[in-house]
Amino acid sequence: MPTKKKTSPETEAVVKAAQTTVEKKKTKAKSPAATHKSPARKVAPRKSEVRAAAVDDMQVEKAAAAADTAFDAGAHHDEIAREAYYLFLNRGTHHGHEHEDWLRAIEIVKARHQA
């Protein structure tokens, strides 16, 4: 049977002090000074960056205004299909030009609605 080591009161005090310092280190929150890092500073944007952002905002507003007045081909699908069919008939019902007929029909309907 192993024998237990005898300790003196002095060694017990040293062991307890070491345990409490380890516990304090574990629970202590790190501050910027403890990590040797300085906190991040806010940097003001340069004048050129501010101007560029303003130009971008104006372009976004113009694009949104143009999108409001943009032609929606999905909303006029039936009308475009009818025009494409008429183009097909005028060509003499020759197959192989469906895509061109469809694109031309979109242009016709767009011109009709934007005039």
Image: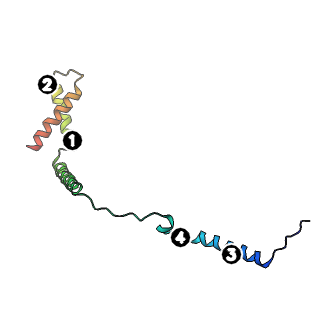
Nearer the observer: mark 3 or 1; the answer is 3
Task: Write the residue at 11% across / 39% down.
Answer: 111
Q: How is the image coloured?
A: rainbow
Q: Alpha-carbon neighbours of circle 4 within 10 Å: few (<14), some, or many (≥20)?
A: few
Disc 2 secondary structure class:
helix
Q: Alpha-carbon neighbours of circle 2 within 10 Å: few (<14), some, or many (≥20)?
A: few
Judging depth in this view, the residue of 110 and 63 nearest the camera is: 63
In the rendered view, tell whether residue 101 sits above or below residue 35.
above
Q: Earlier in the sequence, mark 2 or mark 1?
A: 1
Which labelled disc corresponds to residue 107?
none
Disc 4 secondary structure class:
loop
According to the image, label 2 marks what residue?
A: 90
Q: CA gap, disc 2 to disc 1?
A: 22 Å
Q: Quadrant of the C terminus?
A: top left
Judging depth in this view, the residue of 112 and 89 nearest the camera is: 112
Q: CA gap, disc 3 to disc 1?
A: 80 Å
Q: CA gap, disc 4 to disc 2?
A: 82 Å
According to the image, label 3 marks what residue?
A: 17
Q: Quadrant of the N terminus?
A: bottom right
Q: Earlier in the sequence, mark 3 or mark 1?
A: 3
In the rendered view, tell whether residue 38 sits above or below residue 83.
below
Q: Alpha-carbon neighbours of circle 3 within 10 Å: few (<14), some, or many (≥20)?
A: few
Q: Position of residue 20 (x, y in %)?
A: 66, 74
Looking at the rendered structure, the kind of residue marked 2 is Asn
Nearer the observer: mark 1 or 4; the answer is 4
According to the image, label 4 marks what residue?
A: 29
Q: Quadrant of residue 19?
A: bottom right
Q: Earlier in the sequence, mark 3 or mark 2?
A: 3
Disc 1 secondary structure class:
loop
Looking at the rendered structure, the kind of residue marked 3 is Ala
Looking at the rendered structure, the kind of residue marked 4 is Ala
